[in-house]
Image (cartoon, rainbow, N blue to C red):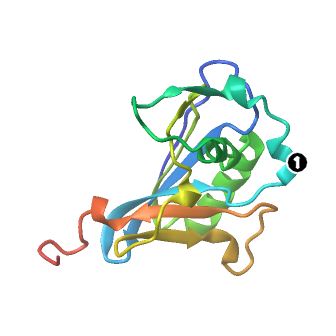
């Protein structure tokens, strides 16, 4: 299993600044499925701790309709360094034979306006969520979900579409 934890290349404005994804070798009939992990819940008081004007940047694209709430959630769904490390350890121990990779890096600040939080993505025929915190004996003190899109990945058996 490849583990790629990229350290932040500069001082981060907040501790909640790390993204994490995994690559599952075989998932729902697909090969090497990337799953983007996030925190689906947080303490409402945490949102009041941040200077959102300093954390948010320019528009991704002109004339883009922007939800400031969604942009804030991009940060609130991220992991702290301690949470990231706990999650990496858990994933290595629990899923070592099923994962091809674990990858993490820091968010780029300021966050561009127009990004959509992972929790706001829609489930569909080929996309959905993995509820890691619903797995029996989940040991971490915070909830973890993962978003996947099967349409981005090859079938396990070629020609099986």
| Vertical relation: 48 (above or below) 139 | above
Q: Is residue 97 left or right of residue 49?
A: left
Q: Taking the image as drawn, is residue 109 in sight?
A: no
**Dot 1, crowdedness within 10 Å: few (<14), some or many (≥20)?**
few
Q: Please, which residue is most extreme toward the top here?
A: 10
Residue occupying image coordinates x 49% and y 67%:
97
In the foreground, 14 or 106: 14
In which image quadrant can residue 149 be found?
bottom left
Residue 23 is situated, as x and y percent measured from the top left of the image, at 44, 57
Q: Which residue: 60% across, 41% down?
A: 71
Please identify the quadrant where the C terminus is shown: bottom left
Please state the horizontal and vertical placement of residue 44, each as a whole percent of the image: 84, 53
Residue positioned 50% across, 62% down in the render: 147
Q: Secondary structure at mark 1?
A: helix
Residue at mark 1: 45
Q: Position of residue 6 (x, y in %)?
A: 55, 33
């Amino acid at each position: 299993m490849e583990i790629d934890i990229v350290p932040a290349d500069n001082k981060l404005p907040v501790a909640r600044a790390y993204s994490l994804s995994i690559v599952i070798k075989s998932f729902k009939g697909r090969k090497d499925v990337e799953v983007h992990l996030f925190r689906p819940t947080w303490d409402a008081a945490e949102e009041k701790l941040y200077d959102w004007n300093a954390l948010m940047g320019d528009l991704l694209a002109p004339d883009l309709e922007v939800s400031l709430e969604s942009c804030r959630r991009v940060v609130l769904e991220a992991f702290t360094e301690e949470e990231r490390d706990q999650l990496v350890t858990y994933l290595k121990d629990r899923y070592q034979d099923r994962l091809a990779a674990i990858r993490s890096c820091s968010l780029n600040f300021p966050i561009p306006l127009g990004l959509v939080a992972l929790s706001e993505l829609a489930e569909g025929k080929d996309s959905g969520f993995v509820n890691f915190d619903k797995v029996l004996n989940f040991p971490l003190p915070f909830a973890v979900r993962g978003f996947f899109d099967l349409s981005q990945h090859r079938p396990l058996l070629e020609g099986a579409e």
